[in-house]
Image (tube, rainbow, N blue to C red):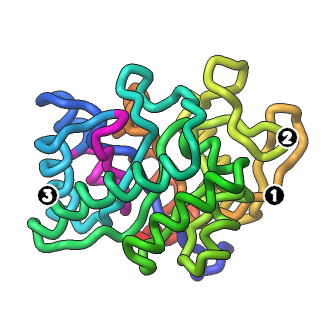
Amino acid sequence: MIPPSLRIDLNADLGEATGAGGAARDEALLDCVTSANIACGCHAGDPATMGRTVRAALARGVALGAHPSWPDRAGFGRRDLDLPADAAYDLVLCQLGALEALARAAGARLRHLKPHGALYNRAARDRPLADAIARAVRDFDPGLVLVGLSGGELLRAGRDAGLPCASEVFADRGYEPDGSLTPRGRPGDLIQDATLAAARVLRMVREGRVASTAGGDLAVQADTVCIHGDRPGAPAFARILRDALTAGGVEVRSL
């Protein structure tokens, strides 16, 4: 039997596609997840998409979060631009401010922040960058939850800054032996089978363990699970994952 105290947040990266197709996909995902990481314009999104996503999330009771990035629309925020830490501080503050304005206009507030793409991966290993992001979040709102890779520098920086933090695991990404995510394009980078991904997440929640691409186990802390909104069939993937967690005795709720 799974203890009734086991719980997890399901988050998805949203607001990354414009048009009717992007809106429909986001709304289907919002029916499954408990937290929304909303693109703030630097890697994807625009004011109209941000506002629409905020309102759609609130209509479903989904917690709002900022998803800031390096300024890299051409590369979807997945290119490591190697900008100074001070630049990251300013970028994060600006993106937080833009999304918070739309949230406030809708009668709500942001609940968390999760960096996107290359900014997220760099902050997991680069302490000065992690400190800059944590400082920006603290200076903006010390009550915001900072979301970062399990075992990474961003979580250590957030805790040292006095922020509430959430340790994130990934349903559909491979893990390297050092705990980093397998770079895209390498063997084992993405897990396509939703049933396999759900089994991996259940093990991460129950046991705090996940298999690496080298075959050994890694220790992880699972406070929130990411579902990539841009993956093919993302809403169906999210539904399979949520149903598997519920069937496994895990409570799914926001941070």
Q: Which residue is mark 2?
A: 177
Please check the rendered image and state whether residue 34 is part of the magenta-colored stretch, yes or no: yes
Task: Say if 63 sits above or below 6 in the image.
Answer: above
Task: Say if 249 sits above or below 83 in the image.
Answer: below
Q: Earlier in the sequence, mark 3 or mark 1?
A: 3
Q: Quadrant of residue 39?
A: top left
Q: Is residue 29 visible?
A: yes
Q: Which residue is mark 1?
A: 219
Q: Please report the residue visible at 90 percent of the width from the left and 42 percent of the height from the top.
A: 216
Q: Which residues are magenta?
A: 27-43
Q: Amino acid at mark 2?
A: Pro
Task: Say if 105 sits above or below 74 in the image.
Answer: below
Q: For this rendering, which residue is in front, 64 or 156?
A: 156
**Crowdedness of circle 3 by 10 Å Cα count: few (<14), some, many (20+)?**
many
Q: Please report the residue visible at 46 percent of the width from the left and 64 percent of the height from the top.
A: 136
Element on which disc 1 rests: strand
- CA distance for labels 1 and 2: 10 Å
Q: Which residue is mark 3?
A: 55
